[in-house]
Amino acid sequence: MVKRSFHPAARQVAAAAAPARTGVATALAGTLLVATTYGMARFAVGLSAPALQAERPALAPALGWTGTVQFTAYAVAALAVARVVDRRPRAGLVVAGATATLGCLGVALATDPAVLLLSVAVAGTGGALASPALVPVVDAAVPRPARPAAQSAVNAGTAVGVVGAGAVVAAVPATAPAWALMAALCAVTAGAAWWTARRAAGRPPGEGTDGHGPSLGGDDAPRPAPGAPLVRPAAAAVVVGAGSAMIWSFGPLVLVDAGAVPSARTGWLWVALGIGGVLGVLTGALVRHVGLRAAWATCSAALALATLGVAGAATSGGVALALGSTALFGAAYMAASGVLILWAREVWPGRAGAGTSVLFVALATGQALGAAGLGAARGGTDAVVLAGAAAALCALGAGRGWSHAGRGEAAVGPGRQEAGGYGRCRSSRARCAVFAASVRVVVVTVCGVSSRSW
């Protein structure tokens, strides 16, 4: 009798633990998929540019255009799936993994500039599908109070992928096998993300999500009001995206050409960027403490400072400054993109995946425009001048976010806010010091360790 009386309690404990395990597994798989489709397939092209130029000189004319082509492909793909990603997120995960895998294989084999550009375009579409598809998947699998932290952790997967890409390039110096390895990782992580999303979809409605989570297959979520709430953050994202293109597309080339970083050591730059980017997991806490507008302004200003730091490193030849600036850039960029995800969830709660697509398209559009403009001017303009222009764009984006986010937040009524009150600053802006202190710790650590290893 005693033994039988414990069975219901044991079953209740097991039933309560199962959704938590599913949520953790889904967030982890999503983090790894973002790591491969973003950090590797999308952003490792800039990391590999010096090696590709040295190994395959015929590709040199195309390297200046890879950023523009990839950012454009990303934007087109994200727009194409914005209407369906909330209804068919698992299909989006499969297509994301397939395109990222094919794109990486294309880069591994490319010997012709046209093939390289086509390959980076295909690779760029992987991230366009992965992140928006993961927003509803994670929201459906994770309990409501933990969703902002889970979304921030998944978004920070880009940093994990950037570190991984740097490690792959350092461990496998030849570009062909390095990109083949990244292709295999894209395929494996896509399969894992699909499997965990399928398990989450098989749970009873409301299990582990207090009954208010989105459905992975349903179309019953309320339609957001047309466009207006996203216009302002989208405008800020375009401007900041244009400024961020300086480091994403040309950072390693600028530092190598200036003699600040040897070509064989560019992998360290990406490792530093990725280590800094891991701080993106704190985005949810940052927004909760200071509000959307202060968080966006802080991240954009940090991007401007990091871009100026890279220019200073190119001028002075300072290795520590180069590493510290890329680490700061990684932290600021991952946090900024995380703010955009939370912004989309705030103003379009019923279509968070579509809202994320819109804001990420805006960010990618700015990056495409910035890469094209900076690439065209790079041949006859000093790198310091280009970096100054890019930093000014980031600072301008910070101002736009600060002046506009307040009105955007005001439009979000209390009834549409999740626990934590993202639309409202609940404490002094001095809480930004927590994030800033974390950034300083990472930058100092990266500079110290990497400089000793140089």
Image: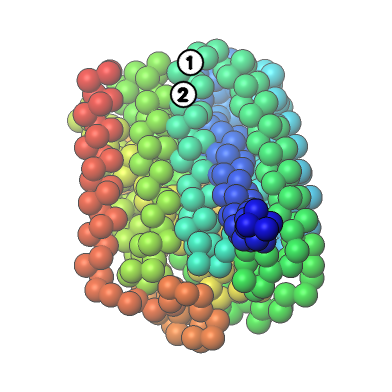
Give x and y (percent) for residue 39: 53, 38
Q: Which residue is mark 1?
A: 171
Q: Is residue 410 left or right of residue 368?
A: left
Along the viewing direction, whichever of 406 and 308 lies nearer the viewer = 406
Contact, mark 1 vs mark 2 (Cβ under 8 Å): yes
Give x and y (percent) for residue 375: 48, 39
Residue 71 appears in the rendering: no
Q: Quadrant of the N terminus?
A: bottom right
Q: What residue lies at 42% left-to-right and 37% top-to-bottom?
A: 274
Q: Which residue is mark 2?
A: 167
Q: What residue lies at 37% left-to-right and 48% top-to-bottom?
A: 279
Instruction: Tell me the amino acid under the disc marked 1.
Output: Ala
Q: What residue lies at 38% left-to-right and 37% top-to-bottom?
A: 275
Residue 83: name its quadrant: bottom right
Q: Secondary structure at mark 2?
A: helix
Q: What residue lies at 66% left-to-right and 78% top-to-bottom?
A: 224
Residue 185 against residue 180 in the figure, above or below: below
Q: Is residue 366 left or right of residue 357?
A: left
Give x and y (percent) for residue 307: 32, 45
Along the viewing direction, whichever of 97 and 188 lies nearer the viewer = 188
Q: Is residue 135 left or right of residue 92?
A: left
Give x and y (percent) for residue 301: 31, 58
Q: CA distance from mark 1 to mark 2?
A: 6 Å
Along the viewing direction, whichever of 301 and 249 lies nearer the viewer = 301
Q: Secondary structure at mark 1?
A: helix
Residue 8 against residue 96 in the figure, above or below: below
Instruction: Tell me the amino acid under the disc marked 2.
Output: Ala
